Image (cartoon, helix red, strand yellow):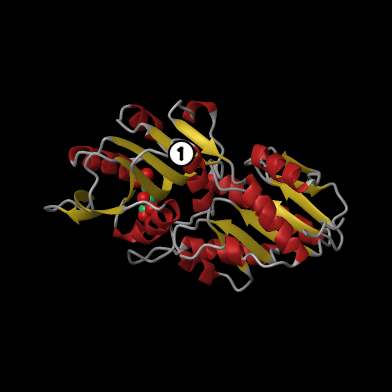
Amino acid sequence: MEMPLSRDLIVVSGTTHPALAAAITARLGATLGRVRFNRFSNENLKVCVEENVRDRDVFVLQTSCSPVNESFMETLILIDALRSASAGRITAVLPYFPYARSDKQDEPGISITARLVADLLVTAGAHRVLALDLHSPQVMGFFRIPIDHLTAIPVLCEALLAKDPTVERVVVATDIGEAKDAGRFAARMKLPLAVIDKRRTGDDEHAMPTAIAGDVRGRHALIVDDEIATGGTILEAVGLVRRMGAAGVEAAVVHPVLSGNAIERLRGSSLERLLVTDTIPLPPEKRDPRIEVVSVAPLLADAIGRIHRGESLYDMASRR
Ligand code: R5P
């Protein structure tokens, strides 16, 4: 039997994703701690915790979305304010991790900014982190505090299986790097796997999908990826699987960043359905009848409850 949550659990939220914060607290049967955010005329931010958090187990929810740098600064100031207010333990719950793709020095003279983000979270006062589908698992190694890394892949799988369970699908990885995650997705859904081979052609720095290992002909291709940003990766994959004879194409992606003109590009493509989660809010201009959203609120609420009660997250954790 699940242990009840104790009174000292409290969830507070930054301003980036109020709907997800409300869904998580509703699921937990908790109330959202009161926090006031003000901006001075010089653009500096003031965060005031209007709740008694002394010695309490505080979960700070903040996802990374536009404006990314503003929202991260807000996260840091909120955590620091909680620390000043004597919070007992502070867990940063980051459904979409800021600067997750800046996780390596792939060019001389650049910052590994995801590591800087980790350092800043700890400096601000975070005691632990809860993250979802990091772009690469090495980000976990940037922390000297505990980090729980979960995956929303089962959430996406269940939503797909509940809908059209009889469609003959083949899971498609957008490149070799994605093959491991896509393989887990395929195993969970008991489906075959195909992997796209990307090559640089000529002088162009951009790697293009040139071939596919696996058979998509006559099947519904289900392209999986951790995030969709400009949409380039997914749409190139859509083009290739169509040319290879796929009968239909859909995609399942955890983080709907949908930057730039991604939504217009999607609308102009032959992608039939894009299944995403709500790790990032979708403003009205980024909605489309082809985009379906499944919530990670139950997953995150379950994880928060377990962390609070000191229970294992082993069966929920990403096996990347
Ligand atoms: C790349 O390694 C990632 O898994 C995604 O494929 C990438 O971030 C998607 O970006 P875009 O939508 O801009 O192609």
Above or below, 161 against 80 in this view is above
Above or below, 111 against 10 in this view is below
| Image quarter in which the N terminus is found | bottom right
Quarter of the figure with residue 271: top left
Q: What number of labels is visible?
A: 1
Element at label 1? strand
Q: Residue lying at the far bottom in this picture: please name it.
A: 144
Q: Residue at x 39, y 54 (%)?
A: 186
Which sits in the foreground, 261 or 130? 130
* Horizontal relation, residue 98 to residue 310: left or right: left
Q: Is mark 1 within 8 Å of ligand 1?
A: no
Above or below, 225 against 105 in this view is above
Q: Position of residue 3 (x, y in %)?
A: 80, 60
Which residue is denoted by mark 1 in the rendering? 275
Which sits in the foreground, 91 or 244? 244
Q: Position of residue 182 (x, y in %)?
A: 38, 55
* Horizontal relation, residue 241 to residue 166: left or right: left
Q: Residue at x 81, y 61 (%)?
A: 87
User: Crowding at label 1, few (<14), some or many (≥20) Cα neighbours within 10 Å?
Assistant: many
Q: Position of residue 112 (x, y in %)?
A: 45, 64
